[in-house]
Image: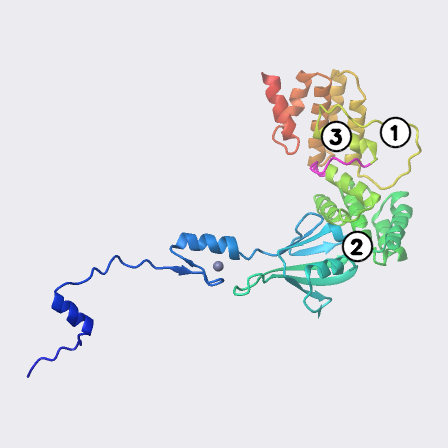
Amino acid sequence: MPTVGWIRESDLDAFYEGTETTPDPGPVREPSFSCPFCSSVFPNQSEFYDHVYAKHRVERPFIMLRGREPSGQAVVRSTLALSEIAVANTSHAIVRLDGVQQKPVSADKLKKIISTTFQAELRLELVNASEPKATPVATDYDFSFRIAQETELKRVEQAFSEILASEAITRSSIGSFLGDERTQGSGKEYASGLADYCLGVLIKERPEGEKLTTPFSRYRELYGRALDVLKDFPRPLARLITCIIRFSLNDLRESGARTGYWELDLAIELLSNPTSASLPHPLGNITRRPVCPIDHGTGRMLELSKHLTAQRRWSPILDEECRTLAYSDLFDATDHQKAFAIWAASAWRLGSTECALEPLTQIAEVYPFSRWASKYLEQAST
Ligand SMILES: [Zn+2]
């Protein structure tokens, strides 16, 4: 049987065979990368990646309210102006207002919806579909709009002033405030923030005759909860109480704008920057009226800083006054720390470095006072 070759020669093969020469096949051909979005071709992977990153990157869409991106679940308690809303990388938005889905809207339309919504649950999906051949990128937010009317907030403040600011606070007066018909409208949440604050004051003070079974430390929870709500209300009373709460929790971060309650402004300035040259001064002989209760521990610290910053020189008597307060059993830990800080700051201001050493040592590791206390200790030891 003859062997039959299973590869048929082509004419060209036959020709080459006849000439006894074979052309050089050349180097292995490089793979190429073609862009799936615009079909440009690139010789290597890194150039391809650079191209996709530069030309076809789909950025995450997001929204900014008053210069900050809200968390996925946010509560809006005051009206937002159009200029306070920024929407970025968004081709359209899908909006559900109180569970009702609307047609997709543009970023501008979305801003209008947000600035004119007062009471609603808004579920928002921002979509960036700028690259037609790529999967769109989306970001979800849930906004709870609880914007109370101005008149309702005023009614709440009126009830607060009558029931909780002019009389001694008790559990039952807090109950009457929350049950008052003026606190039932859209200002209800504002009222609950104010009530939490007052309950915190009460628990922190533990007055006799008040049957309080709640643990002492729960006042911090109540202060925190009140802070969380009240910080969003652009009203002088809410702002004052949030400053008092922050001060009492030794949170001096947002100091800056003054509250007008000069003892508080003074103590905040003293504890933020003990060598500050611009401590606030009393406002002269103007009549003052009680605006809100302050817990006795915090009140005592305000008096101490007022008393000590009025001194011209330091003495062992002042040392002893401070020592008694700073080591007293009746205060909460935050007030002990404040007493040491006021003591240290005042002695240091008056040039009594020696006397400042004892309190400085106590707060050298305690934030936020450690920011200056450790520095002063170092200076004193060199
Ligand atoms: Zn491309």
**Eyeballing the image, is 15 above or below 163?**
below
Name the spot of residue 244 as percent of width and height, x first. Answer: 77, 39
Instruction: For residue 237, say whether it is visible.
Output: yes
**Eyeballing the image, is 75 above or below 243?**
below
Instruction: For residue 213, say whether it is visible.
Output: no
Name the spot of residue 49 as percent of width and height, x first. Answer: 45, 54
Question: Quadrant of the image for the C terminus?
Answer: top right
Name the spot of residue 293 as percent of width and height, x first. Answer: 84, 41
Q: Nearer the viewer, mark 3 or mark 2?
A: 3
Q: Quadrant of the rendered structure where residue 279 is?
A: top right
Question: Quadrant of the image for the N terminus?
Answer: bottom left
Inter-mark Cα distance, 3 to 2: 31 Å
Inter-mark Cα distance, 3 to 1: 16 Å
Q: Quadrant of the rendered structure where residue 333 is?
A: top right
Residue furthest to the bottom in view is 1
Q: Which mark is residue 269?
A: 3
In-image side of 84 versus 381 (left or right): right
Residue 254 is a magenta residue: yes
Residue 255 is a magenta residue: yes
The tag earlier along the polypeptide, 3 or 2, is: 2
Q: Secondary structure at mark 3?
A: helix
Q: Secondary structure at mark 1?
A: loop
Which residue is under mark 2?
A: 189
- Residue in the image at 89% along x and 39% along y: 290
Q: Given the image, on which type of amino acid does mark 3 rest?
A: Glu
Which residue is under mark 1?
A: 283
Inter-mark Cα distance, 1 to 2: 33 Å
Q: Which residues are magenta?
A: 249-259
Task: Give whichever of 288, 32 is nearer the camera.
Answer: 32
